[in-house]
């Protein structure tokens, strides 16, 4: 069972109504106008002006009565509760129940072996109507056909069905909508179901129960080999790999969702893609020991990879009804454009590797490979990559053995170069599309290079990384204490980046090799057998890692891709600074009185009305001292890289019981909390209780953390340190408890019962759902961003394993 780890406390009906009406008051609180609040029966007050109720055309001014507060609602379990407004988080979240079954059969002899297994998984999401179902089959077979010939194959098949919740999204994302949508839960939602009032947010209750986004995926992966022993010390092995995947995705948003609301009258989409790859490895291995002290293992080979892929999609809107949805795309009276693509990539390599060992004490390794990629341009497709390593097992020296203290002591050093061909297929080729252009006073058809793919770069080459490692392995007290230290330095040159270029080129972007990044760090791991007795055992595993990176080689500052809409120029790439550096303004409190506003050169000669309107607004630091707040006043405001990360595992065994704890943590990293972008205190979207409690008022100006509430969509809140939060956390990631039963009858080899829990406890100062976030996945230039991310769930599992 999976549950939501934590909720974000938003305003309830009474505070929300107070907040919206306070906006109306503050928005009219200019020079010469006196606002008061007249008492209303009970505990409520309506905003008034000079003793008369405020009537601001187009402004939504609710009272608690606007929120449905009578009647009973019945949930899926038959429980009845009094409805008082809507907690949209409760409307979309649920306990996700999962079940998984595994069955395997295996056997074999010296002549051959076989294994067959099946798996079924039904995993419910913590957001309603989101789930994942999978059927998986696997077989692994091998046979010694002759003393010199061995054959084997491994085949995997999976069929999966995913029902998505639109998380990690800004436009109508279900998590975003559940947080900022007004807490109205009435019979007529149309009065506030509007982008005017809820920018890019949709009714969460409607969305989670009616929107459809479904993916069907089929995947096949197979690998096979033939191993031929040519001589006792010489073996040839041929490996073949094949993979195939096919994905079909269907979406439909009916008339009750924002995407399908009038005039769209339903919005449907279908897309499918397939991908297949073939891998061939031909390897010749020499493996021999000379005079019982010299061991040599050498490999030479050739590898080839080819991938083919294709995709197509279509959309349609304006359906006569919502009955058939995306199953009848032709019913949509407004079809969208048909989009299709296909491509092929190839990678060819030759390689050689040699390992030498003398008495197991002195070890040397050297390798070479030459890779050629079809993704890169002519003359730049091939690159060479070398590596080498040395190791000295000091514990095998007699003078160390005589000490009688060390069980193992090994010193290691290595160097290696690797490459990255990370651009899309055909990205380095010009792409032409049909275009119309004026000629002789008329439009003529022809071909033009499309600008969205970027300008052609004929010099684009491999991105390369050189890494140096130095390590030490130690073991003491009959291996009860083991310790490893690894230090490294890594430099990545000729970074592959898609950068903005001058519009005078006729293009917007271009792929280039530019700059470098260095990483240096230290990794420590340890194992400790605290107790080792027949009835009781206790083992401890621990690790901690430190890493520092820096950018260099840039001719000028650059920025990573935008996060969304106007969330641009946030992550800066600057020489000497780490990837993940956030760039913005520094806040300097609020304008608490008119004198402070007048002291700002920007408003020194402003009208009284403008000065009064600035009370309770944010002040920003004028870092360059020119008397204005401009882009020149931006500076580094945060760093998403942690000072260190760590893990700690404790495993206990008492007779037939086992118990394990796994802790993990990240210390010193910042998070860009993009969720707060919507908390401008300036529109009808809901806000958190903490923000409401710390808003600026004339009575609470000394302790204010957020500006005053106003009714406007035009409030400018600059990208500042306000959105940077401490992302450090310590988490109890996993707890497991198991028991091995005594064998109750013949034919049953073992019976093991276990229970486990994940994400049981998180210690953090981060204000949102989960500090372990990364909205942009593997994009290193935009890591550490939280934008309505799907929160990690707390899961509880119970299982049984039987071997026959």
Image (tube, rainbow, N blue to C red):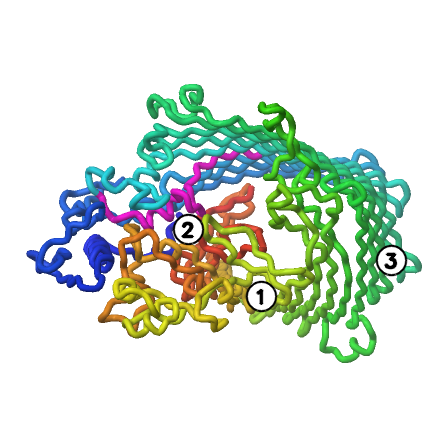
Q: Nearer the viewer, residue 399 or 194?
A: 194
Magenta residues, as a range?
A: 158-185
Q: Residue furthest left?
A: 41
Count of picture labels: 3
Which residue sits at x=21%, y=61%?
29
Decide: few, some or many residues near mark 3? Use Cα within 10 Å; few <14, some 14-19, many ≥20.
Answer: some
Mark 3 — residue? 295
Q: Is residue 166 magenta?
A: yes
Distance Cα–Cα, label 2 vs label 3: 56 Å
Q: Is residue 512 magenta?
A: no
Residue 242 in view (yes/no): no
State if disc 3 and disc 1 touch (CB < 8 Å). no
Distance Cα–Cα, label 1 vs label 2: 34 Å
Which residue sits at x=23%, y=40%?
191
Residue 176 screen position, x and y as percent: 37, 48
Quadrant location, the C terminus = top right
Q: With respect to residue 325, does 22 lie above or below?
A: below
Mark 1 — residue? 541
Residue 788 got which mark?
Answer: 2
């Amino acid at each position: 069972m999976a549950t939501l780890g934590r909720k974000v406390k938003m305003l309830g009906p009474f505070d929300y109504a107070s907040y919206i009406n306070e906006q109306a008051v503050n928005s009219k609180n200019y020079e010469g106008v006196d606002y008061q609040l007249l008492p209303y029966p009970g505990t409520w007050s309506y905003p008034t002006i000079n003793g008369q109720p405020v009537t601001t055309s187009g402004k939504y001014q609710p009272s608690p009565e606007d929120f449905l507060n009578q009647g009973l609602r019945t949930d899926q379990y038959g429980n009845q509760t009094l409805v008082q407004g809507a907690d949209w988080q409760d409307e979309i979240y649920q306990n996700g129940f999962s079940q998984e079954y595994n069955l395997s059969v295996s056997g074999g002899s010296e002549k051959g072996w076989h294994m067959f297994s099946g798996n079924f998984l039904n995993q419910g999401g913590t957001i309603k109507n989101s789930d994942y179902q999978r059927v998986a089959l696997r077989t692994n077979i091998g046979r010694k056909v002759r003393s010199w010939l061995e054959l084997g194959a491994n085949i995997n098949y999976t069929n999966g069905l995913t029902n998505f919740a639109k998380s990690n999204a800004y436009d109508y994302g279900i998590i975003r909508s559940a947080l900022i949508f007004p807490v109205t839960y009435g019979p007529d939602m149309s009065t506030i179901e509007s982008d005017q009032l809820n920018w890019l947010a949709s009714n969460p209750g409607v969305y989670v129960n009616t929107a459809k986004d479904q993916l069907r995926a089929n995947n096949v992966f197979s690998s096979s080999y033939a191993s031929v022993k040519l001589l006792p010390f010489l073996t040839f092995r041929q490996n073949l790999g094949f993979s195939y995947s096919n994905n079909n995705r269907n979406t439909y948003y009916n008339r009750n969702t924002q995407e399908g609301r009038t005039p769209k009258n339903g919005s449907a989409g279908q897309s499918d893609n397939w991908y297949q790859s073939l891998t061939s490895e031909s390897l010749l291995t020499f493996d021999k020991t000379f005079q019982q002290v010299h061991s040599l293992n050498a490999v030479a080979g050739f590898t080839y990879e080819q991938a083919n892929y294709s995709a197509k999609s279509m959309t349609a809107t304006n359906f006569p009804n919502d009955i058939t949805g995306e199953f009848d795309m032709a019913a949509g009276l407004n079809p969208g454009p048909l989009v299709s693509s296909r491509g092929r990539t190839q990678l060819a390599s030759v390689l050689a590797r040699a390992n030498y060992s003398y008495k197991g004490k002195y070890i040397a390794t050297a390798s070479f490979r030459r890779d050629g990629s079809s993704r890169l341009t002519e003359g730049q497709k091939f690159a060479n990559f070398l590596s080498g390593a040395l190791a000295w097992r000091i514990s095998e020296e007699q003078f160390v053995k005589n000490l009688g203290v060390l069980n193992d002591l090994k010193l290691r050093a290595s160097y290696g170069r690797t490459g990255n061909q990370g651009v899309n297929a055909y990205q380095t080729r010009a792409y032409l599309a049909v275009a119309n252009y004026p000629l002789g006073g008329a439009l003529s058809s022809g071909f033009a290079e499309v600008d969205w793919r970027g300008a052609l770069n004929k010099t684009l080459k491999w991105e390369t990384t050189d890494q140096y490692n130095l390590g030490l392995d130690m073991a003491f007290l009959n291996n009860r204490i083991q310790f490893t230290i690894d230090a490294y330095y890594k430099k990545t040159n000729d970074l592959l980046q898609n950068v903005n270029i001058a519009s005078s080129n006729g293009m917007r972007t271009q792929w280039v090799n530019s700059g470098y990044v260095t990483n240096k760090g230290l990794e420590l791991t340890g194992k400790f057998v605290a107790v080792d007795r027949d009835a009781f055992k206790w083992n401890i595993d621990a690790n901690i890692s430190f890493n520092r990176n820096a950018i260099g080689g840039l001719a000028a500052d650059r920025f990573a891709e935008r996060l969304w809409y106007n969330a641009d120029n946030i992550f800066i790439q600057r020489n000497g600074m780490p990837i993940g550096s956030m760039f913005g303004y520094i806040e300097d409190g609020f304008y608490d009185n008119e004198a402070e506003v007048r002291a700002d050169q920007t408003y020194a000669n402003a009208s009284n009305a403008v000065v009064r309107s600035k009370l309770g607004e944010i002040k920003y630091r004028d870092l360059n001292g020119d008397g204005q707040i401009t882009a020149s006043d931006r500076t580094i405001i945060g760093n998403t890289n942690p000072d260190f990360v760590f893990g700690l595992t404790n495993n206990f065994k008492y007779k037939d019981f086992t118990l394990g704890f796994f802790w993990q943590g990240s210390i010193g990293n910042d998070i860009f909390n993009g969720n707060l972008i919507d908390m401008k205190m300036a529109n009808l979207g809901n806000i958190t209780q903490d923000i409401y409690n710390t808003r600026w008022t004339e009575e609470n100006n000394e302790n204010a953390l957020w500006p005053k509430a106003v009714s406007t969509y035009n409030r400018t809140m600059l990208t500042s340190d306000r959105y940077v939060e401490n992302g450090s956390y310590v988490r109890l990631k996993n707890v497991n408890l198991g028991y091995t039963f005594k064998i109750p009858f013949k034919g049953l080899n073992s019976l093991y019962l276990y229970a486990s829990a994940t994400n049981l406890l998180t210690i953090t100062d981060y204000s949102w759902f989960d500090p372990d976030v990364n909205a942009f996945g593997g994009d290193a230039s935009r890591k550490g961003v939280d934008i309505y991310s799907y929160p990690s769930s707390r899961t509880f599992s119970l299982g049984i394993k039987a071997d026959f």
